[in-house]
Amino acid sequence: MLGIVSCKKEEKVIAESMTITLRLGVYKNDTIQVFYIKKTDDSYSEELSIKQFVEGKNELQTLNYELPVGVKPKNIRIDLGETANYHDSIRIEDVILKYRDLALDGSRGAYKAWFIPNENIYFDSDTLVHRLQIHNDIYDPQLNGNQLLNTKIIKLFPPDVNERYFNE
């Protein structure tokens, strides 16, 4: 009887992760970094981030960030580069957050409602081009997830997920 119970528990083991997909135009070699927090009142940290080098091209590119297995983030922040250049800009076509068969589709600029840009980013409301600038001698362009994004991310995770187990 115990053997059967143990087997059933193992069947509930999950190995799932959330994927963040960015479809963007990056015109210079740089690093795009995605930060995530596990609790709503946490601060973003390097330990909970994923960096990807991106080669500057005159065409759209797709970057995929897969969060560690079992992580159910409360919010995300996207850092749009580390190296300042004169007349920097990035065109962001899509931001898609996917977990299992559920997705938040931020295509055609819908993602703009989910983020608050910091003072290193400016853009017109009708464009997908984010202009990056040095502000007060600091260059750290960030799109910070807002309360709306927090609410949408939480809805990606069905309540039973919090009660399941996973192995690393």
Image (tube, helix red, strand yellow):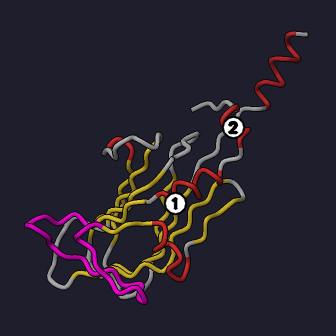
Q: Residue at x 39, y 58 (%)?
A: 77
Q: Is residue 54 in the magenta section?
A: no
Given the image, on which type of amino acid does mark 2 rest? Ile
What is the x, y in percent for residue 11? 79, 31
Q: Are marks 1 and 2 in contact (CB under 8 Å)?
A: no
In the picture as drawn, the residue positioned furthest to the front comes out as: 147
**Residue 95: numbered disc:** none
Where disc 1 sits, the SS reads helix
Query: Would you call the spot at circle 2 few (<14 residues within 10 Å), some (14-19), or many (20 or more)?
Result: some
Residue at figure coordinates x 71%, y 46% from the top left: 158
- Which segment is the magenta one? 118-141
- Disc number for residue 14: 2
The image quadrant that residue 71 belongs to is top right
Nearer mark to the viewer, of 1 and 2: 1
Question: Which secondary structure lies at badge 2?
Answer: loop
Q: Which residue is mark 1?
A: 149
Disc 1 to disc 2, C-alpha distance: 25 Å
Residue for point 27% across, 74% down: 121
Vertical position of residue 38 compared to residue 63: above or below: above
Counting residues from the start of the chain, the first of labels 1 and 2 encountered is: 2
Q: Residues within 10 Å of mark 1 (few under 14, many from 20)?
A: some
Q: Residue furthest top?
A: 2
Q: Quadrant of residue 139?
A: bottom left
Q: Is residue 122 magenta?
A: yes
- Label count reads 2
